[in-house]
Image (cartoon, rainbow, N blue to C red):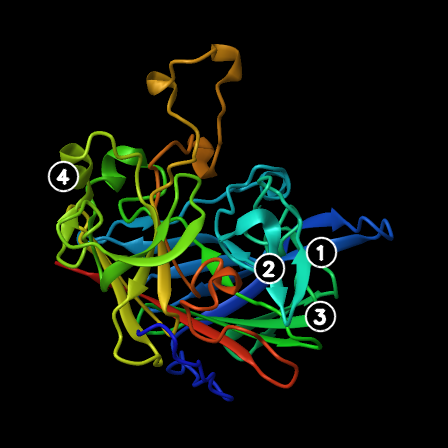
């Protein structure tokens, strides 16, 4: 996509293929106390199951994906996303945004500030002096309202004017569905009462070998991303406003590359946490974003989206495994996931479609980004799974 083009969002997003053979059930995951009223509210869990033995579970706290089961080429079913059995682990910090919907603005905002029509807005600087993923109480920390609509789950969230410093009352409606074709479809729509900035995504941590197989198997994934450029960032991961070519660099994933080999050839490489500018002639519906294969299990993931970039992240900030930790043993951090498995560095990867990070601070280099009253923000992403026999 060429920078400088104005974005046109579709008014009525298309529905995915009707999920005839899919079941959808709801249950109570836990209870949470309202910080204002003291009232106990339900945290709902939703479970889809299709005829291919694919199962997806979500909760409406953070509009989060908590499980995704899929058979391998031998018929063995594994959960292929990181998550927690205990709600307390989602509620406590740090959660590492595992499986959560990210907003009001995903990724980083330089100096926690931006300007709209000559007015500067100061934001919640949760990674001082910058902001990350909407601030200390972003959408991942909210209990969304939710309901079942046919085979879809609809979740909604109201972000009030000045929430984390952002202007405008914003209403977000999110739609989630599992299809017969092993597609998990996410759609986000947002509306605002004032000109504002919205940039939503979801941070599902995948490991196609199984959520509990760790870095060893995560590095055995083969990854390709449909991008010739990355959105450059400095050492603090703050965007510079430049697109830089990735040809002949460690970040060139235009051809499928085994992550283990990429890391081995670049021993100083911490991992991927890079924003890839997707190669599309025009801003269009459902461009091909990425393909990830785990050869041993035969599981394949393809991602399609209407967003112009994708953040590829390899779990670099997850806790260091005890055998690799060289600091004070008393300061060793642990993150216990499902099946009482410790989640450690490089234990999962994320492919999170989104708009250009820090876009309002680079108005001369990226397309139109404002969400104005009467307009609709629209983001769709499809995670499609295959089994290679």
Q: Are marks 1 and 2 in contact (CB under 8 Å)?
A: no
N-term mark: 3 or 2: 2
Which of the 4 quarters of the picture holds residue 193?
A: bottom right
Disc 2 element: strand
Q: Are marks 2 and 4 in contact (CB under 8 Å)?
A: no
* Disc 4: CA contacts within 10 A as few (<14), some (14-19) or many (>=20): few
Residue 114 got which mark? 2
User: Where residue 85 sits: x, y (%)?
Assistant: 53, 42
* Residue tagged 1: 42
* Disc 1: CA contacts within 10 A as few (<14), some (14-19) or many (>=20): some
Given this view, does label 1 or label 3 mark the residue nearer the observer?
3
Q: Residue at x 33, y 19 (%)?
A: 324
* Disc 2: CA contacts within 10 A as few (<14), some (14-19) or many (>=20): many
Residue 261 got which mark? 4
Distance from disc 1 to disc 2, alpha carbons, whole Å, reads: 36 Å
In the displayed structure image, the side of residue 192 where residue 19 appears, left or right: left
* Residue tagged 3: 168
Q: Residue at x 61, y 54 (%)?
A: 113
């Amino acid at each position: 996509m060429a920078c400088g083009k104005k974005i046109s969002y579709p008014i009525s997003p298309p529905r995915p293929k009707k999920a005839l053979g899919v079941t959808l059930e709801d249950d109570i995951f836990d209870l949470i106390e309202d910080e204002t009223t003291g009232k106990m509210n339900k945290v709902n869990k939703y479970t889809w199951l299709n005829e291919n033995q694919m199962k997806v579970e979500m909760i409406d706290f953070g509009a989060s994906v908590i499980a995704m089961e899929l058979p391998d080429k031998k018929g063995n079913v594994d959960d292929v996303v990181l998550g927690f059995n205990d709600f307390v682990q989602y509620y406590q910090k740090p959660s590492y945004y595992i499986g959560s919907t990210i907003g009001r603005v995903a990724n980083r905002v330089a100096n926690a500030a931006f300007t709209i029509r000559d007015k500067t807005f100061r934001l919640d600087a949760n990674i001082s002096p910058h902001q990350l993923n909407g601030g200390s109480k972003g959408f991942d920390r909210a209990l969304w309202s939710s309901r079942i609509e046919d085979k879809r789950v609809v979740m909604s969230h109201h972000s009030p004017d000045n929430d984390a410093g952002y202007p405008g009352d914003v209403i977000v409606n999110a739609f989630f569905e599992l299809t017969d074709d092993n597609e998990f479809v996410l759609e986000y729509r947002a509306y605002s009462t004032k000109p504002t900035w919205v940039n939503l995504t979801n941070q599902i941590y995948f490991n196609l070998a199984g959520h509990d197989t760790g870095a060893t198997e995560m590095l055995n994934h083969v990854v390709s991303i449909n991008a010739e450029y990355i959105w450059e960032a400095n050492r603090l991961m703050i965007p510079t406003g430049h697109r830089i070519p990735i040809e002949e660099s460690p970040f060139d994933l235009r051809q499928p590359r085994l992550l283990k080999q990429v890391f081995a050839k670049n021993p100083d490489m911490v991992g991927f946490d890079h924003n890839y500018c997707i190669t599309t002639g025009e801003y269009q519906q459902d461009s091909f974003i990425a393909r990830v294969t785990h050869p041993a299990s035969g599981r394949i993931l393809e991602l399609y989206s209407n967003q112009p970039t994708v953040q590829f992240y390899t779990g670099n900030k997850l806790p260091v495994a005890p055998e690799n930790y060289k600091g004070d043993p008393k300061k060793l951090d642990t993150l216990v996931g499902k099946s009482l498995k410790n989640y450690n560095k490089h234990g999962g990867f994320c492919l999170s479609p989104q708009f250009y990070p820090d876009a309002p601070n680079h108005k001369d280099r990226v397309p139109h980004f404002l969400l104005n009253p009467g307009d609709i923000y629209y983001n769709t992403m499809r995670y499609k799974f295959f089994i290679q026999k």
